[in-house]
Image (cartoon, rainbow, N blue to C red):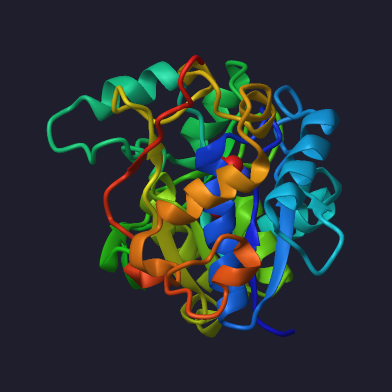
Amino acid sequence: MSAAGRFAPSPSGDLHVGNLRTAALAWLAARATHRRFLVRVEDLDAQRSRADVAARQLDDLRAIGLTWDAEPVLQSSRHAAYAAALAVLRDGGDTYECYCTRREIREAQSAPHAGAGRYPGTCRTLSAADGAALRAAGRRPALRLRGADVGHRWDDLVLGPCRGVVDDVVLARADGSVSYNLAVVVDDLWQGVDQIVRGDDLAEQTATQLHLAGLLGGGTAADAVEYGHVPLVVSTAGSRLAKRDGAVTLADLAAAGVPVADVVRRILASCGRAVPEGARTLDAAVAGFDVSALPRAPWVFVPPVGC
Ligand code: GLU
């Protein structure tokens, strides 16, 4: 399959200018390197995902100038593929059952020497007898990745040389639902995605996802993927941009008198030397786009006056 980049929003809320900027950068990076571009609807969380939001997200992406080369795939239609991947990992000895409650994990994480934010490994060496006793007491296990504390390095298109440790992330929850980390890797492999440009809040997941890609797709599949983690967009208060920051979606901005073309110009202007001078549309910015020249600092989005 030919090379591809992608944008994979979760349809839990309308896209704001920060999300749109990340989507634009993923699209520009793919098109500038002659890749296909795909959009994937990450709607695994049935409680928070909404079909009308997904449709609006696609409309907004089209409105800023994104194009894609295949019908967007919905993760909610891919359960058989995730079950097959789980079976491969389980059969390969790369998973273990975890009976911990959230509270137990929190407590273990606060112990000295626990890796910050990572699963402390409590159930990694649980015996079959202990597992059976917990089941008998009514506990149902989640399935975790046996990460074995290995590290992964990658040369990030934006951040430069990076290194991360593989976490024993949950692959399937006790209720059987599969996790973001499993689904994202299964789908990127299946769709032939070999360039992932996304928000830098996901950089800490990359080592785990590279490890999973190696297990599911072979070492070469993992090595073939290039990552670029772009700085998030923040409000004038310095926090990650959110709905509460005023006019931040295309609809809000249009209502405040800012047309889509102006939003695109502001996004392009925020990209510094990454974007060729004078480009006013995404199409015009493809030739000469260089994601590695993106400013490393977050973009501070100042909503239009009066919002
Ligand atoms: N669906 C994820 C999100 O909206 C992004 C997944 C990814 O780009 O790897 O945060």
Nearer to us in this view, 127 or 7? 7
Q: Residue at x 44, y 29 (%)?
A: 241
Where residue 130 appears, x then y in whole percent? Answer: 47, 31
Q: In the rendered view, does 56 fall on the left or right side of 18?
A: right
User: Relative to residue 226, is residue 241 depicted above or below?
Assistant: above
Q: Residue at x 27, y 64 (%)?
A: 163
Q: Is residue 146 visible?
A: no
For residue 137, what is the image quadrant?
Answer: top right
Nearer to us in this view, 84 or 15? 15
For residue 188, what is the image quadrant?
Answer: bottom right
Q: Is residue 300 visible?
A: yes
Q: Residue furthest left?
A: 112
Where residue 285 appears, x then y in whole percent? Answer: 55, 69
User: Relative to residue 164, is residue 252 depicted above or below?
Assistant: above
Q: In the rendered view, does 294 fall on the left or right side of 16?
A: left
Q: Residue at x 70, y 68 (%)?
A: 37
For residue 90, what is the image quadrant?
Answer: bottom right
Number of disc labels: 0
Where residue 259 appears, x then y in whole percent? Answer: 66, 38
Where residue 20 appears, x then y in whole percent? Answer: 58, 45
- Image quarter hosting the N terminus: bottom right
